[in-house]
Amino acid sequence: MYYACMKTLDLAPHTEPTVLQFLETAASLERKLDRVLSSTKGVSFSEYRLLKALSAAGPTGLSRIDLADSVGLTASAVTRALKPLEKIHLVVTERSERDARQSLAVITPAGRELLDDAGNILRDALRGLPINALSPQKISEFQTRLGELGKR
């Protein structure tokens, strides 16, 4: 997924190694978070992101299209990802008669509880990262630069 975007970017030769390293680091971190959540809470990091987006949406929930936009997936990928969450009662969906992509997904109380627990587990895992040795100002600057990269 990360490397597919590299083919469409027109980068200066000296930029590519940095971008590739960034993408490899992001993929590695995502795998680590996925392992931590899967082994402790039984959900993947992707599922955590879906639950987090649904929690932020409040009691009205989100359509699959809006949920897909918020987590960077396709609507069909969201549909597939929500099924296991529905089976374990972390999410409920209100089906649209016409279009499954317009069905609303809503986080359940059990989903909120798992999200809170998973958030604590992720915070503990993230505390061990080398970036925490940086000052709050340096971290803020880094976050700003990452945001700028994503906008271009």
Image (spheres, rainbow, N blue to C red):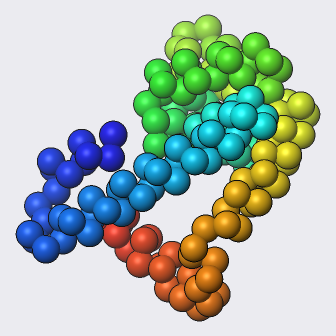
Q: Would you place residue 140 above or below residue 30 in this image?
A: below
Q: Residue at x 24, y 42 (%)?
A: 4
Write down the quadrant of residue 91 in the picture. Answer: top right
Q: Residue at x 42, y 71 (%)?
A: 146
- Tell me: 36 left or right of 117: left
The answer to whether any part of residue 25 appears in the image is yes
> Where in the figure is residue 17, as x and y percent of width and height?
21, 65
The answer to whether any part of residue 106 appears in the image is no
Q: Would you place residue 65 above or below residue 80 in this image?
A: below
- Tell me: 151 left or right of 78: left
> Where in the figure is residue 15, as x and y percent of width and height?
18, 71
> Where in the figure is residue 127, as x and y percent of width and height?
70, 67
> Where in the figure is residue 33, as x and y percent of width and height?
62, 47
Q: Residue at x 13, y 65 (%)?
A: 11
Quadrant housing the C terminus:
bottom left
> Could you say which is closer to the camera, residue 81 or residue 37?
37
> Could you say which is closer to the camera, residue 3 or residue 8?
3
| Number of disc labels | 0
- Tell me: 63 left or right of 143: right
Q: Would you place residue 36 above or below residue 142 in this image?
A: above
> Could you say which is closer to the camera, residue 120 or residue 99?
120
Q: Would you place residue 19 above or below residue 91 in this image?
A: below
Write down the quadrant of residue 100 in the picture. Answer: top right
Quadrant housing the N terminus:
top left
Write down the quadrant of residue 60 in the picture. Answer: top right
